């Protein structure tokens, strides 16, 4: 049976309505998402910590702060790119605020250490909060002042402009929970197991507990 003009028109209208609703939903979802880029030493650890936080949609390991486009992990750790190991945290501000995430971040690192973090030394392992506009800078500076008051020590973690974020390659994403086998000095291990051994040996949680005590949000390890 040949479809009539009215049926065609109604069908086209229905398609337009569905498309409009999908676009509206996508825009709403995008509006509910914000990002925060921080550097806190080993990006595996920062990613593992913040993916536990209610309201965090995901965390991605990468690099920020330098002037080399698409740097590799080896280039960054070798030095000379200006990049730090960083993590881009995507979150729903209706569930967790940027200020809350900054509060947690500063208490998950040693913000008094200007030479690296824990066993990882050198520029690429230093800390920073990256910001995209004056409002984000104000929040970051407020969080740092609050951390200094809480510690009674100078916080050396700087607030830096976010000029770009370069994701690390897939090998480094979700490292802390990967079941992929790799060869370590202890023999074959999953990435998750190797990560746990590294985190313990590096002394991250021990130093954070020493510094922040009960205020340390993630110092149980992961």
Image: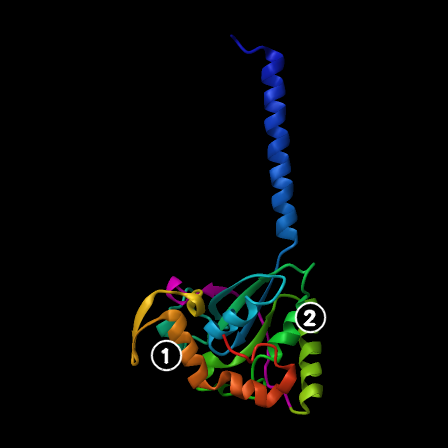
- Residue 172 found in image quarter: bottom left
Give the structural element (helix, strand or loop) at label 1.
Answer: helix
Visible residue check, residue 121: no
Q: Which class describes the residues within 10 Å of circle 2: few (<14), some (14-19), or many (20+)?
A: some
Q: In this view, does 132 lie above or below 117?
A: above
Chain part drawn in magenta:
154-172
Number of marks = 2
Q: Position of residue 30 (x, y in %)?
A: 62, 51
Residue drawn at point x = 69 percent, y = 70 percent: 99
Could you tell me if the residues under marks 2 and 1 are in contact, i.e. CB atoms within 8 Å?
no
Q: In this view, does 174 lie above or below 123?
A: above
Q: Which class describes the residues within 10 Å of circle 1: few (<14), some (14-19), or many (20+)?
A: few
Q: Is residue 50 shown in magenta?
A: no
Give the structural element (helix, strand or loop) at label 2.
Answer: helix
Q: Position of residue 92 (x, y in %)?
A: 64, 59
Q: Which mark is residue 99?
A: 2
Q: Where is residue 29 in the image (x, y as percent from the top left)?
A: 62, 49
> Which comes sooner in the sequence, label 2 or label 1?
1
Q: Residue 78 carries which label?
A: 1
């Amino acid at each position: 049976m040949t479809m009539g003009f009215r049926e065609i028109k109604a069908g086209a209208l229905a398609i337009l309505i569905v498309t409009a609703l999908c676009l509206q939903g996508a825009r709403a979802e995008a509006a509910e998402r914000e990002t925060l880029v921080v550097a806190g030493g080993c990006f595996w650890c920062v990613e593992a910590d913040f993916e536990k936080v209610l309201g965090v949609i995901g965390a991605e390991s990468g690099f920020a702060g330098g002037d080399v486009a698409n740097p590799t992990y080896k280039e960054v750790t070798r030095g000379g790119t200006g990049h730090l190991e960083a993590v881009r945290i995507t979150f729903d501000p209706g569930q967790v605020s940027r200020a809350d995430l900054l509060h947690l971040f500063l208490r998950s690192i040693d913000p008094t250490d200007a030479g690296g973090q824990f066993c990882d030394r050198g520029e690429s392992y230093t800390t920073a909060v990256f910001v995209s506009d004056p409002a984000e800078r104000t929040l970051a500076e407020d969080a740092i002042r609050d951390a200094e008051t809480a510690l009674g020590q100078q916080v050396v973690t700087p607030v830096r402009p976010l000029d770009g974020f370069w994701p690390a390659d897939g090998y480094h994403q979700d490292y802390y929970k990967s079941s992929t086998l790799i060869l370590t000095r202890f023999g074959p291990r999953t990435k998750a197991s190797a990560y746990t051994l590294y985190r313990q040996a590096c002394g991250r949680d021990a130093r954070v507990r020493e510094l922040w005590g009960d205020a340390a949000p993630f110092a149980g390890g992961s």
